[in-house]
Image (spheres, rainbow, N blue to C red):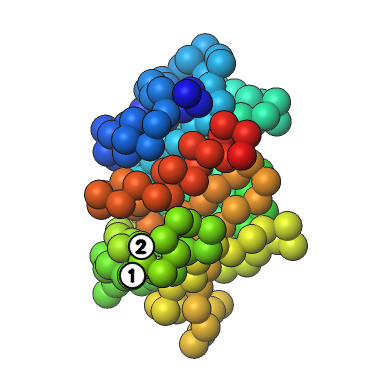
Amino acid sequence: APQIGVLALQGAVAEHVRALAASGAEVRTVHRPAELEGLDGLVVPGGESTTMARLAAPVRLMEAVRERHDAGMAVFGTCAGLILLAESVADAEALEGFERIRGLDVRVRRNGYGSQLDSFTEDLAVAGLPGEEHPLSAVFIRAPLIEELGEGVEVLAASEVAGTQGTDGERSPVAVRQGRLLGASFHPELTEDTRLHQLFVEMAGGA
Ligand code: GLN
């Protein structure tokens, strides 16, 4: 079975472990660079990107994840994890001076769906999932807005909800893939539907 780690500095760790195990992966939590050894994939959970970046700094964990990804490890960032995976972050003062993983060619805006929409749920059609005709129920909690996409980035799902800036009246991308990187601005680990985790386990396993 593919070996998948869950970055366990802070955030929704246990829920991802459960969803990955249910998707056929062998799962372990990751706190230090040495624990990345031998992993086919890593999930970077939702939570608070600034807290995770701060906790990772003393052991240079963000740099270690980037190096392992360059060597072939797949990475799935959800919500705060997507922020850590993004090449570029708008309004990033709170993250300044802290390393992120980077690599996913998008620009995200933290809390980019605005305060009145701090939390919402939306049924999404996600390309490439089995049972595509059955929408995925997606939970957004102070979610980052993907406001710019590089050419190599494939949009798997978009939201009816426009962001506070930049995507006026347009659907906003909320699940994206670029090579062995997967990003979601919502929390797929908070529902019983494990199809996105299954997709990631397949990606990490070489599919
Ligand atoms: N707003 C959070 C951040 O900037 C992300 C929220 C989440 O992961 N649910 O890190």
Residue under the point 70% across and 26% down: 71
- Three-letter amino acid code at the position of disc 2: Leu
Q: Secondary structure at mark 1?
A: strand
Vertical side of 62 occupied by 195: above or below: below
Q: Earlier in the sequence, mark 2 or mark 1?
A: 1
Image coordinates for residue 160, horizontal then vertical, percent: 42, 79
Residue under numbered circle 2: 136
CB of residue at label 2: within 8 Å of ligand 1?
A: no
Give coordinates of residue 140: x percent, y percent.
32, 61
At a point 62% along the width and 66% down the height, the residue shown is 148
Name the residue nearer the viewer: 123 or 118: 123
Q: Does residue 105 show up?
A: yes
**Residue identified by numbered label 1:** 123
Which residue is the extreme one toward the right?
Answer: 151
Above or below: residue 196 compared with residue 145 = above
Find the residue positioned furthest to the top: 34
